[in-house]
Amino acid sequence: MNTPSKSQAPSANWDDKQYLVIDDCASIRQLLRESLRGMGAKHIDQASEGCEALALIVNKRYDVVLCDYHLDGAKNGQQILEEARSKNALMPSCIFIMVSAEKSADSVMGTAEHQPDAYLIKPITEGILTTRLNRIWQKKQVFKKIDLAYLKKDYAGAALLCDFQIAGNPLYENDLLRMKAGLLLKCGQRDKAGAIYEQVLRDRDFSWAKVGLAKIRLLEGEYSVACQMFQEVITENRLYLDAYDQLAAAHKQLGQSEQACNVLERAAKLSPNSVHRQKTLGEVSLRLGDVPLAEKAFRKCISVGEHSVHKTADPYFGLARVCGLKKAPKEAMQILETVQRKFSGDVSQLRARITEGLVCLDNGDDQQAIVIGQELEAMLAGASAASLPDPNTCLDIATLLFEVGNKEPAIKLLCHIIQNNDDDKAIRDEVQKVFNYVHMGDEGTALIAAARKEVSDIMNNGVLLWKTHRLDEAVDWMRAARLKLPGNLRVLLNTAQILISHLQKHGYDAALEAEAVRVLAEVDKTAPNQRRHNELTEQLTALVLDTADLEAQAAISH
């Protein structure tokens, strides 16, 4: 990696920058343009509503965006920022400042969670704007190369760049250490990240460092310890919203759904405009049977998500279930019709049918529920393991099948969930709840244990073939295991390990390398930031580079 220059960030030249001013009020746009021109700005575009602003951001690289929070039309400033980032339409060097007359906690907290570079309250003078822009620009220059490496997913390289910048920019040392620790976590290097958090805490009591250590405990499966650490952060800083989300996740892993629900509810009161948090709160409270809370969360999620890039069908299905439980089947069916209009795809159609069946059961329409159950049973009979939906959808299918008397396919589906998530206690607990609900508690416990043992036996046989150097057999065995258990993280990791071992022992094979790359991509999709994933990726990269070097040397010698 080339060593960057240690020179201090130059002063910003505001004359040659590209600007975008977003505000629905023409007079405010004029005032902001005049302030920018007073700084020397020449290239200023403007937009009066969200869709127009996004079209400009997607098609042009801006250096500075000044965006009002409340806009006429569909999208607000927070949603513009969310969508622009999700489309990678904003370069890391771009300064995005939210501008608003709104001082309410809802707006400020919601915007802060999406981390614009600043949040300025109107009216804004040219002096305030210039001072803030200069301050942000200086920091952006320090992080510029780090951010570019991050965009390329070169997390290890970005972490090394943090070390260099720390040496030359002591003013930003804590920010750089925070960035470096987060990058190390993405590389799976939890020990090194933890050492940084501990180093920082020896000097100052930063909440972000405490949360970082707690996240490591969470990743290591130390859920009780993580709960205690997150709770300490919340006690000290009740506005640290990420700690609430992580605490709820830890409670869920411990099977403490009521505590998770309580934490999410408190966070949602502090910042009610988070689409993801409202959805999660709705789902957790619905599974607990707290119908009023679930309804409130799902309705809020639908409202704040209507024009968000994070909009999904999930809260609509949740709200339809709520209406079914409230004996309002007509409204439930209207919601499901809305889903089918707004969301395309086979998964949405399947979930709509499942939800319809559950609503029918809740409201005494057993005949229609039986018809839907038969459809689902036929679908399962012809489905491969890889084509089955996510665990929560499978839980709903199994519940419906049990209720309409289709016991065997329901049991098979629950065993599929267990075998693809055998290390996930929260999912095991949900499966057990379904068995308990249909009065099969003891039998369900035995079935769960048997399903997990089958996974263990499959894994052990693959490892045995690997350790006894029967690598061709090991590769074939793990391929069969992947077909049966396509979502099992340990199966995926062991498959990648055996493929790489085969390449190391028997020589390079392009097809096996491509297969290993696909498996590792599936690992990262299933469970990001796994240490073993990064170790295996490094092994595979080194092997491919060594092969390329040998081929180059052979070509030269001839």
Image (cartoon, grey):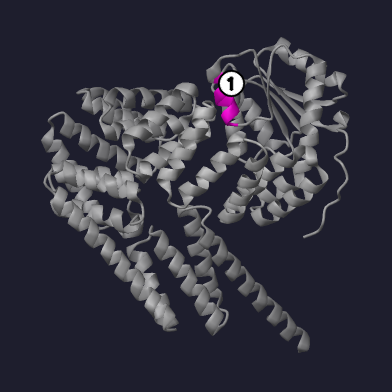
* Residue 357: % across, % down: 21, 37
* Residue 420: % across, % down: 34, 57
Looking at the figure, which quarter contains the N terminus?
Answer: bottom right
Q: Which residues are magenta?
A: 107-114
Residue 341 appears in view: no
> Which is nearer the eye, 355 or 338?
355
SS at mark 1?
helix
| Residue in the image at 76% along x and 33% along y | 63
**73 in the magenta segment:** no
| Residue in the image at 53% along x and 69% along y | 514
Residue 133 appears in which quarter of the rendering? top right
Numbered label tally:
1
* Residue 56: % across, % down: 68, 31
Amino acid type at image mark 1: Val
In the image: residue 300, left or right of residue 290:
right
* Residue 297: % across, % down: 38, 25
